[in-house]
């Protein structure tokens, strides 16, 4: 498949609405963002939910309501974050899988995260992987550093393939504490995919200033793209992001220039091993 899978990560858990007013934090804002991003070419939405005060939450009710609304109002593949915020307890993060998403993120190791620590113990990783297998939820394996690909190879070797049978990873690059958002680091990660099952695919996300270099490197290396205000709130030097749509439109433009136009949600489902829209797993 030569097209580009485009994921939008519109909200995240780190930015405050007061600092970034364009951040979608209500269900209405999230659904409207999803619809518009799909119309532009996105096929997956990576979701962090906020509460009534616009703070990150893993409340089950809100997660379920969000999945249901995105399912009925858009054709996007709904991927819930199991990473949450750095303060979220493991039990709440595991419970995300039960909220009925198509996909969930699954991070392959502990990483320094700015001044914080994003904790992902081996036993937690195994439990999350197993819970997704049982629930029929397709994982996107989040890779913040090269060694986490070795952890993924070990996980698949010992605990089997994910639901859907496809292995898709997202290189999250440029986090202070993780790998840098450079072409060299991306090529090193791509090379390490040889230790994963044949046909494993990757997307890449450049945090902050590394957004553009990572986007260009991923496209040229045959990878897919994740963009959104979870990862950057700056569009260019001295210019704030106006909306998630602006970031998706730019990614789509580059993908078309590279003659790798955006995949439709239906084609993205095939690539990722996610059952067709409307079918139950
Ligand atoms: N918010 C970060 C601590 C994920 O969504 O799985 C974790 C994160 C990764 O964003
Ligand atoms: Zn996330």
Image: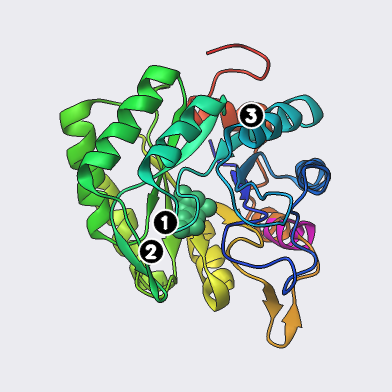
What's drawn in magenta, residue-wise?
A: 244-251
Nearer the observer: mark 2 or 3; the answer is 3
What residue is disc 1 on?
Answer: 171
Q: Which of 239 and 61 is in front in this view?
A: 61
Query: How many other residues sit within 10 Å of disc 2, few (<14), some (14-19) or many (≥20)?
Result: many
Report whether residue 221 is seen. Answer: no
Magenta segment includes 248: yes
Question: Residue 213, image x and y in percent?
Answer: 53, 73
Secondary element at image label 2: helix
Report whether residue 3 is seen. Answer: yes
CB atoms at circles 1 and 2 under 8 Å apart? yes
Secondary element at image label 3: helix
Q: Please name the residue shown 44% across and 71% down the image.
A: 174
Q: Residue 64 carries which label?
A: 3
The answer to whether the beta carbon of the residue marked 2 is less than 8 Å from any atom of ligand 1 is: no
Q: Is residue 44 shown left or right of residue 273? A: right
Question: Residue 13, image x and y in percent?
Answer: 57, 58
Q: Is residue 36 shown left or right of residue 253? A: right
Question: Residue 41, image x and y in percent?
Answer: 73, 45
Q: Earlier in the sequence, mark 3 or mark 1?
A: 3
Q: Which mark is residue 186?
A: 2
Secondary element at image label 1: strand
Q: Which of marks 2 and 3 is nearer the N terminus?
A: 3
Q: Is residue 2 shown left or right of residue 109? A: right
From mark 1 to mark 2, how far is it between C-alphas?
A: 8 Å
Q: Please name the residue shown 57% across and 27% down the image.
A: 269
Q: Is residue 113 above or below residue 224?
A: below
Q: In which quarter of the image is residue 31?
A: top right
Q: Quadrant of residue 68?
A: top right
Q: Which of 32 and 255 is in front in this view?
A: 32
């Amino acid at each position: 498949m030569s097209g580009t899978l485009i994921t939008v990560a519109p909200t995240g858990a780190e930015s405050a609405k007061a600092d970034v007013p364009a951040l979608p934090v209500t269900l209405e804002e999230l659904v409207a963002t999803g619809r518009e991003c799909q119309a532009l070419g996105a096929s997956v939405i990576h979701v962090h939910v906020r509460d009534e005060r616009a703070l990150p939450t893993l409340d089950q009710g809100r997660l379920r309501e969000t999945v249901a609304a995105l399912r009925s109002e858009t054709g996007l593949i709904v991927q819930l974050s199991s990473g949450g915020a750095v303060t979220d307890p493991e039990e709440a993060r595991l419970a995300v899988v039960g909220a009925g998403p198509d996909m969930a993120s699954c991070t392959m190791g502990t990483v320094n995260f700015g001044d914080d620590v994003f904790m992902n113990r081996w036993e937690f990783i195994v439990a999350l992987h197993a819970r997704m297998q049982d629930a029929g939820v397709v994982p996107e394996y989040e890779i913040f550093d090269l060694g986490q690909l070795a952890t993924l190879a070990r996980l698949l070797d010992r605990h089997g393939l994910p639901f859907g049978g496809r292995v898709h990873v997202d290189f999250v690059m440029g986090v202070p504490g993780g790998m840098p958002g450079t072409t060299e680091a991306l090529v090193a990660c791509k090379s390490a995919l040889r230790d994963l099952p044949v046909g494993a695919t990757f997307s890449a996300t450049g945090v902050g200033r590394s957004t553009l270099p990572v986007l260009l490197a991923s496209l040229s290396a045959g990878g897919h793209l994740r963009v959104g205000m979870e990862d950057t709130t700056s569009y260019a030097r001295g210019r704030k992001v106006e909306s998630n749509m602006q970031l998706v439109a730019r990614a789509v433009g580059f993908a078309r220039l590279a003659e790798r136009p955006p995949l439709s949600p239906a084609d993205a489902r095939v690539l990722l091993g996610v059952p067709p829209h409307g079918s139950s797993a």
